[in-house]
Image (cartoon, grey):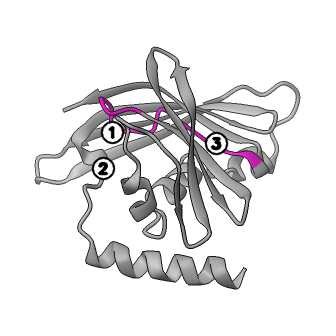
Amino acid sequence: MKRLIFALMVLMVASIVVSQHQLNLLDYELVVYRVSVEDRTALISLQISETNTGGYEVIYTVKFSVIDELDYEVFAVPYMYLMMSYIYNPAFLPFLGMIDLDNPSTVNLYGIKIVYEKDEKVGKYTGKRFSLYSSDQKLFTWVASKQIELPLKFEIPEQGYVAELVEFRKR
């Protein structure tokens, strides 16, 4: 655990020093993901439009089906935030930036390892599947494509969380 904390601290400092290309969701008009958490599935969308004042209006919608009961847990699940907090976490950005989508290979640094697993088709898109391990424990998996900035798929195996890109529209 101490090694993980140390590695994360080093990565946070490195992410401040190293300039990285980061995804700006304001470059998109629409982003839609299908998110599954254990036995629940929802369609999550972000609709982003410019306002007259030079700002942006963002509409975040969650669409899901209920079989028999609408309980608190349905509302409490932070569907989109969970994925974004991993993918755009300053601690992980340097590692995610180290992968080479043209020649994928294993990256191993400070006890954190990123492993290329295979090519994977997600909906109508195809990308490369990677998993991030810390001390041989899989923390999360994602599918990335060179043609699309957004993660095609994202999984947190320990929590049964899977998010798959359904649709997007860039400005």
Question: Dot 2 corresponds to which residue?
Answer: 23
Question: Dot 3 corresponds to which residue?
Answer: 155
**Quadrant into which the N terminus falls:** bottom right
Horizontal relation, residue 166 to residue 101: left or right: right
Horizontal relation, residue 44 to residue 36: left or right: left
Dot 2: element = loop
Q: What are the residue bounds of the magenta stretch?
A: 145-157
**Nearer-N-terminus badge (2/1):** 2
Q: Identify which residue, 57 or 7, lies in the foreground.
A: 7
**Nearer-N-terminus badge (1/3):** 1
Question: Dot 1 corresponds to which residue?
Answer: 149
- 15 part of magenta stretch: no
Amino acid type of the residue that numbered disc 3 sits on in the rendered structure: Glu
**Distance in Å between CA atoms under marks 1 and 3:** 17 Å
Callout count? 3
Q: Position of residue 34 (x, y in %)?
A: 58, 29
Asked if marks 1 and 3 touch (Cβ < 8 Å), the reply is: no
**Distance in Å between CA atoms under marks 2 and 3:** 19 Å
Query: Which of the labelled discs sits on residue 27, or is there none?
Result: none
Q: Position of residue 146 (x, y in %)?
A: 32, 33
Which residue of the protein is positioned furthest toward the top in this rendering?
124
Amino acid type of the residue that numbered disc 2 sits on in the rendered structure: Leu
- 156 part of magenta stretch: yes
Residue 79 seen: no
Task: Give me the residue at 64% from left, 76% from top.
Answer: 4
Task: Give me the residue at 61% from left, 44% from top.
Answer: 141
Q: Main secondary structure of the magenta part?
A: loop
